[in-house]
Amino acid sequence: MSAVSPAEAFGRALDGGAWHLALECGSRVAVPFERFTGDVATVDERLLARARGPVLDVGCGPGRHVHHLARQGVLSIGIDISQDAVRLARRRGAPVLLRSVFDDVPGAGTWGTALLLDGNIGIGGDPARLLRRVAGLLAPGAEILVECAEDGFGSPEPTARLEGPDTVSAPFPWALVGPGEMPAVAAGAGLRVADEWVDGGRAFAALAAA
């Protein structure tokens, strides 16, 4: 079975089925795409109640978080590099842009909260670099709300593949950051863990300027 691009694998995953992240260390982590494509869960609602607008959702996927925020009257925009995800998000009425967080992002310096949920702290395989970039987009006093992995994946060059029914992606840079690793990762980006909690079996942290 030949490998497809990560973007193509992600697009196929949004259609359903059992998918995993296969990490270079040999571990396989289930990816709950059915959760990503559904409506916000109660856990998400409680998390999003902490967000101060305007809100930037980095790696928004099919847009369930920004869709919920928009319905609550909170100014928010999601960005994602997957055309399939953006298409699904716009279909549900979520305000999203086809954009990488490392490209020009509108409203730089004005965002009140940034979201790195559903494992998106792993984008690019270098969490500290990602956090520095996101922090540079925020207004003074803003926070980054991060969802942690159950276990971290400490590797200098972490990579992963998406594996699903009859599909495997080419390798791409990705990292997992567990709650125990978050303080060090945040410090590497000039941030601190202002709060951390577990809700519904999912671990979260609020990061602020050090």
Image: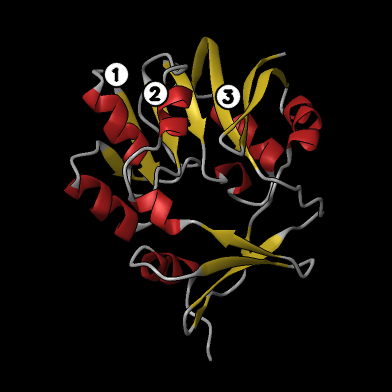
Farthest residue, direction top: 141
Q: What residue is pinned by disc 3?
A: 135
Say left or right for 82 vs 113.
Answer: left
Viewer-closest of 172 and 28: 28
* Residue type (three-letter) at the residue carrying disc 3: Ala
Residue picked out by circle 2 = 55
Does residue 89 appear to the left or right of 49 in the view shown?
left
Question: What is the distance, in whole Å, between disc 2 and disc 3 at their CAs?
Answer: 13 Å
> At x 25% / y 26%, what residue is drawn?
70
Q: Earlier in the sequence, mark 2 or mark 3?
A: 2
Residue 123 lies, in percent from the top left, at 58, 48
Query: Residue 28, percent across and down?
Result: 68, 66
Query: Which residue occupies the foreground of this view, 91 or 48?
Result: 48
Task: Identify the mark nearer the N-term, 1 or 2.
Answer: 2
Instruction: Verify CB contact (< 8 Å) between mark 2 and mark 3.
Output: no
**Image position, residue 79 (x, y; %):** 38, 41
Could you classify mark 3 by the number of other residues whose Cα lies within 10 Å: few (under 14), some (14-19), or many (20 or more)? many
Front residue of 12/42: it is 42
Proximity of marks 1 and 2: CB atoms separated by less than 8 Å: yes
Labels 1 and 3 touching (C-beta < 8 A): no
Element type where label 2 sits in the image: strand
Residue at image coords 49%, 56%: 32
**At numbered mark 3, what does the secondary structure look like: helix, strand or loop?**
helix
Q: Nearer the viewer, mark 2 or mark 3?
A: 2
Q: Is residue 52 visible?
A: yes
| Numbered tag placed on residue 104 in the rendering | none
Q: Earlier in the sequence, mark 1 or mark 3?
A: 1
